[in-house]
Image (cartoon, rainbow, N blue to C red):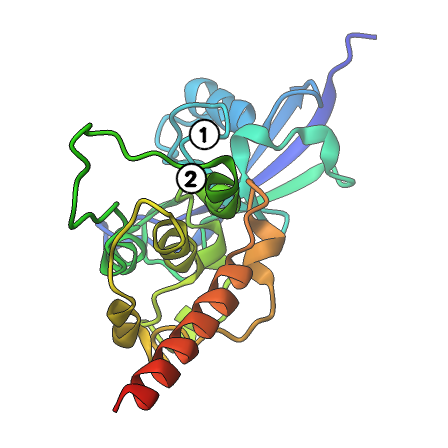
Amino acid sequence: MNGLVDYHFRIFRYDALNPGTKPRFSSYLLQISPEITVLAALLKIRDEMDGTLAFRYSCRSAICGSCAMVMNGTIGLACRTQLRTFEERTIIIEPLPNLEIIKDLVVDLEPFFAAYRKVRPWLMRKSFPESGEIRQSEEERERIERFVGCILCAACYSACPVPARNPRYIGPAAFAKLARFLFDSRDERSEELLEELNDEAGLWGCDTVFKCIEVCPKEIRPTDAIVDLRKMLLKHKIRKLFRR
């Protein structure tokens, strides 16, 4: 026994730059070890069987988030999904939903990153200590730890049902990043910024169906961030009301 298993890959194909092509599935038969990842199988198909196949990848270590795709109906990272995790020997691979297809498994991530930029995902300071060092306690660090690990793979954005009906919706990853900075003891941004998200395209657009939590490869809980930010916004509005 050589440990190899026959797998049937059905991969979505489409080239948006070639108007003559139609969406379709291409089939590839591989005899391969079930211990390798979906990404390794895709590389083998591209290198040995079909050099026209397009997909994204980079680190191969579940750090960059580039290889997020749909595998047998489940969104995940191809670089960390081993073939042995599938009950079926037929593996259907599709691009991420909620994003326009460029070619095959490559989607246009600009709407995702445009929404991400709206929350100003960087540390904001108004004052700086003379020492140049901004200290943070272990307790303060733990408050943001649950959101720091986001790798911007867009899995949560693609699993979310809201962008399909409201393209203006910012999405779960952006809110997780906003919470990461807004709850950071070193950040001095004003809670007034939450006013910009006080609508259905912002904090009130979430359906709280937890799809973002289900698919996150880093076990981040964007829905928790949205709930916490909603509470912060309401408290801010109440404080403003009583200051009048």
Q: Do the residues bearing badges 1 and 2 touch, measured as CB atoms within 8 Å?
A: yes
What's the amino acid at mark 1?
Ile
Circle nearer the N terminus (1, 2): 1
Closer-to-camera residue (13/224): 224
Closer-to-camera residue (243/161): 243
- The residue that label 1 is drawn on is 63
Considering only vertical position in the picture, is 99 above or below 65?
below
- The residue that label 2 is drawn on is 151
- Secondary structure of the residue carrying tag 1 is loop
Q: Residue at x 43, y 25 (%)?
A: 46
Closer-to-camera residue (170/121): 121
Q: Residue at x 42, y 39 (%)?
A: 151
* Position of residue 138 measured from the top left corner of the image (x, y, whole percent): 50, 35
Most extreme residue toward the top is 2
Could you tell me how far apart the alpha carbons at marks 1 and 2 are, in whole angstroms? Answer: 6 Å
Image quadrant in which the C terminus is located: bottom left
Q: Residue at x 32, y 58 (%)?
A: 100
Considering only vertical position in the picture, is 203 above or below 93?
below
Residue 65 in view here: yes
Closer-to-camera residue (187/35): 187
Considering only vertical position in the picture, is 34 above or below 177?
above
Residue neighbourhood size for the residue with mark 2, other residues' Cα within 10 Å, grouped as few (<14), some (14–19), many (≥20): some
- Secondary structure of the residue carrying tag 2 is loop
